[in-house]
Amino acid sequence: MARIALAFAVPLLVAACSDGGAPAEPATGPADAAAFAWNTRSGEAPLVIAHRGASGERPEHTEAAYALALEQGADVLEPDLQMSADGQLIVRHDPYLSTSTDVANRPEFADRLTERNGQTDWWVMDFTAAELRTLTARQVFEDRDQGYNDQYPVLTFVDFLDFVSEQEILCSCVIPIEPEVKLPGLYAEAGLDPLPALIDALEARDLNTEGAPVVIQSFDPAFLQRLRPETPLELAMLYAGPDEAGYDAGGLSLEQIAEFADGVGAYKAVLINPDGTSTGYLERAHALGLDIHVWTVRADRVPITGETVEDELRALYGLGVDGVFTDHPATAAAVRAAMAGE
Ligand code: G3P
Ligand code: CA
């Protein structure tokens, strides 16, 4: 049911981005390995999607993380989006700030500490975008390199789009993005509906157009259904599995999802069993015209199948996922290249 296939038209251009900024040569990317038969819906090579940037090696959602992802051969950049008090989209995974920024060390914000739903923290929605841009980012995972903490500012979505535009000029290529709108219902209840902010930001860049290199993701089916008439862009319904309340696509079937979305962003275990065999979910999604972008492949975590992250990637690529969200784009790109015989 996918109405456009933009996500698979651009990697050839993006492949030129990983050469350190030189002008684009004729496309020479993984999809050129025509002899290799990928099981993706399009038959093209699967996309490497930088999950919050190269977040395994740099603080997530920073320019440093996104720049490293491009150097490592990522095809697509993912920003998660929250809302500020003044209605701007902010590039953060969590609605709170204590774990991913230096806010706790900022005395001028001490009185913003607020309890919400049993959690006392500093919340994105209580800060203006200007205030948030003064915060610096930190590595969220304690077992990852903390040496890049407090060097890079928190970004607004506009900052992120500016960064992408600058990188596109440097590489003379197109850099697709896959923004995820976080908690749209919560923000709408607070009078901070992210939908108009999203549309405005995209329209300001002429990106809310058919064929633009943008896929919008959300765990909230009602948000995607509301977004559907407002954009020709591809929409991805995020799905963690039927037993994950709040992350279960509202209990909608794949057939129902296909009525408003173009793909599913699925958790790994939705797709493959521990022995590496298919659950059948991807095949049913593909039959309905839905792409599958799987999350999240992490080189420093136990794989869901096999012994190594390379085993996990080979299983997912072999199954036929159309894209892989990964904290470690270099690993995902290397495995993909090896499978294609490059
Ligand atoms: O958007 C795909 C994946 O990132 C969903 O999980 O929590 O990392 O945003 P999360
Ligand atoms: Ca995400």
Image (cartoon, helix red, strand yellow):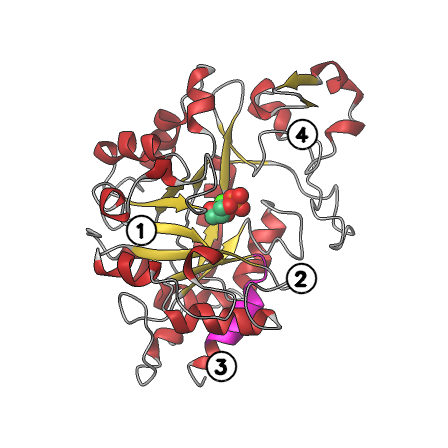
Q: Name the residue under label 1.
A: 263
Nearer the camera: disc 3 or disc 1? 1
Please state which amino acid type lies under the numbered disc 1. Gly
Q: Residue at x 28, y 29 (%)?
A: 226
- Segment colored magenta: 327-336
Q: Of callouts 2 and 1, which one flags the residue occurring earlier in the amino acid sequence?
A: 1
Q: Can you give x and y, in whole percent of width and height, for residue 8 in the image?
A: 31, 62
Identify the secondary structure beneath mark 4.
loop
Nearer the camera: disc 2 or disc 3? 2
Q: Can you give x and y, in whole percent of width and height, for residue 205 in the image?
A: 35, 39
Please state which amino acid type lies under the numbered disc 4. Thr
Q: Do the residues labelled 4 and 3 touch (CB within 8 Å)?
A: no
Q: Of callouts 4 and 2, which one flags the residue occurring earlier in the amino acid sequence?
A: 4
| Majority secondary structure of magenta residues | helix
Identify the secondary structure beneath mark 3.
helix
Q: Quadrant of residue 209?
A: top left
